């Protein structure tokens, strides 16, 4: 499970405006209704609190400096902070100004606490003195841990410890005043009290929002951290004046742009795994195409893609005046870096396959893999070269009724072939409703065009009662491994008394 690190800068509306004032200035930022939204530590020492009215705050601290809240200014001031964090660990997700989350780069920095210390140190050098970190399995728990961390330190919740950590937290952390008020009137005081209520009753009384809060109280926050989108300034642009009509001339002129594009991503600790190349002619978009890479795009890869796209029939009908390289998918550089002793994908193979793909189409060149399942055919996994497969069934999930993982069939037939398996007296061998055999396999014929041969060994059955709840789609199948006296080994199945050959072992 990926761990999450939350960085919290308390009283950010005040921090965003303090550069204009001395650090020890007593200051408060007011909401539109005149109540205090946030205040500085010096103002807090004088008794100013959040939610206090303007008059009461000034009575507690006569020298208090008041500013109106400006949400846009908060966001603008937080942008350099996000950029700094991205230079240390890409993939930061801003939650709101002053609060952000990212995956814990523990492996790179030598541990979770060490990663938090490095990021905190850089933020302190940037001028943010009050920075706190929380690390946990989920976003909600990590945020609550950050709010309980000392200044410039990290609070680490052990893996699997979210339920124990949130159990004693007050209901106020749910940030829903109406629901918290009702829960208190019901006699509940902590998240642990709330978590002990039946989930069905909570959903019935409070609806989807209440059910979500109940999951948070149980330490089960399944929300994903959404990383920031690539800024528009990372788009590579090459403008040609005068316009060019030769694909080679355009590709040659694009080299500097491609190198700058890759360098800008590298500075952020990222690489592009998918790009969209847009070609303009006469000031309008004339052609665009998305390209994917099995590893990541170098500057030479980008120039090649532009050249291949321009050489496709019908692309250059008018002189080209601009080419844009737009990153569609980026990934952390560490996820794609080669190991210390090599072992990466051969670059010549990548370029050769990509060239073939540009000629025959992106869907025509595919890579193969294995996914979870019971049927050998449904375990096959293919995807266009460079694309990451989607909707993949996990291989480590339990698959009752599946055949042993090793040895795996070497050749899976496109369609099961009719087969025959008989006992010693020539009677057909079938599987009963209780999973037993009507006889021991003695002879078999894996395909109609092959000769009968004696059974040297066999294993099974592995029965499957699939989709039993669907009258029309239900299947009862039993699979066997059968070895002939000639040494050939087969994966066979029987369904409704009929035998089929699905694969062969080599």
Image (tube, rainbow, N blue to C red):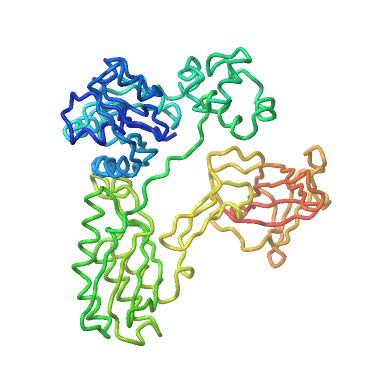
Residue 201, placed above or below residue 251: above
Q: How many marks?
A: 0
Q: Quadrant of residue 211?
A: top right
Q: Which is more toward the observer, 162 or 486?
A: 162
In screen coordinates, is 495 left or right of 342?
right
Residue 53, placed above or below residue 260: above
Q: Quadrant of residue 110?
A: top left
Q: Which is more toward the observer, 14 or 187?
A: 14
Q: Residue at x 19, y 35 (%)?
A: 19
Q: Quadrant of residue 2?
A: top left
| Residue 427, horizontal then vertical, whole percent | 84, 51
Residue 92, placed above or below residue 136: below
In screen coordinates, is 443 left or right of 404?
right
| Residue 160, horizontal then vertical, whole percent | 46, 24
In screen coordinates, is 205 left or right of 362?
right
| Residue 231, horizontal then vertical, whole percent | 31, 54
Q: Which is more toward the observer, 46 or 438?
A: 46
Residue 323, placed above or below residue 341: below
Q: Quarter of the image containing the N terminus? A: top left
Q: Residue at x 64, y 29 (%)?
A: 206
| Residue 201, horizontal then vertical, whole percent | 69, 25
Q: Residue at x 20, y 61 (%)?
A: 260
């Amino acid at each position: 499970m990926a761990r999450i690190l939350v960085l919290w800068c308390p009283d950010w509306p005040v921090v965003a405006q303090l550069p204009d004032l001395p650090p020890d200035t007593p200051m408060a930022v007011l909401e539109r209704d005149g109540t205090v939204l946030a205040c500085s530590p010096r103002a807090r020492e004088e008794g100013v609190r959040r939610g206090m009215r303007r008059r009461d705050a000034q009575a507690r601290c006569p020298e208090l400096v008041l500013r109106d809240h400006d949400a846009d200014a908060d966001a603008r001031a937080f942008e350099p902070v996000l950029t700094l964090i991205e230079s240390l660990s890409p993939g930061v997700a801003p939650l709101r100004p002053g609060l952000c989350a990212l995956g814990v780069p523990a492996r790179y920095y030598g541990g979770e606490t060490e990663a938090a210390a490095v990021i905190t140190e850089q933020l302190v050098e940037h001028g943010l003195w009050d920075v706190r970190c929380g690390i946990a399995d989920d976003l909600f728990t990590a945020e609550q841990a950050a709010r309980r961390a000392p200044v410039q330190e990290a609070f680490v919740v052990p893996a699997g410890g979210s339920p124990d950590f949130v159990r004693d937290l007050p209901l106020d952390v749910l940030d829903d005043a109406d629901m918290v008020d009702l829960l208190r009137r019901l006699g509940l005081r902590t998240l642990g009290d709330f978590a002990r209520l039946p989930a069905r009753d909570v959903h019935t009384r409070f609806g989807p929002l209440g059910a979500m809060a109940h999951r948070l109280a149980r330490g089960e926050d399944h929300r994903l951290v959404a990383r920031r989108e690539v800024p528009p300034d990372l788009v590579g642009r090459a403008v040609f004046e005068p316009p060019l009509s030769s694909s080679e001339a355009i590709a040659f002129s694009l080299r500097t742009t491609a190198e700058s594009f890759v360098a800008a991503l590298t500075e952020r600790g990222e690489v592009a795994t998918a790009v969209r190349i847009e070609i303009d002619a006469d000031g309008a978009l004339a052609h665009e195409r998305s390209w994917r890479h099995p590893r990541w795009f170098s500057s030479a890869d980008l120039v090649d893609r532009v050249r291949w796209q321009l050489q496709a029939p019908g692309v250059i009908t008018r002189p080209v005046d601009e080419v844009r390289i737009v990153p569609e998918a980026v990934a952390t550089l560490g996820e794609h870096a080669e190991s210390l002793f090599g072992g990466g994908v051969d670059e010549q193979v990548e370029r050769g396959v990509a060239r073939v793909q540009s000629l025959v189409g992106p869907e025509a060149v595919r890579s193969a893999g294995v996914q979870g399942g019971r049927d050998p055919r449904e375990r096959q996994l293919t995807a266009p070269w460079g694309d990451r497969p989607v909707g993949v069934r996990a291989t480590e999930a339990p698959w009752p009724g599946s055949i042993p993982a090793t040895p795996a069939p070497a050749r899976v037939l496109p369609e099961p072939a009719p087969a025959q398996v008989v006992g010693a007296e020539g009677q057909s061998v079938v599987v009963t409703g209780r999973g037993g055999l009507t006889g021991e396999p003695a002879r078999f014929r894996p395909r109609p065009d092959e000769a009968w041969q004696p059974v040297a060994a066999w294993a099974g059955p592995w029965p499957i009662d699939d989709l039993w709840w669907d009258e029309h789609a239900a299947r009862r199948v039993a699979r066997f491994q059968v070895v002939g006296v000639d040494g050939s080994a087969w994966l066979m199945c029987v369904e409704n008394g009929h035998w089929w050959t699905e694969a062969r072992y080599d």
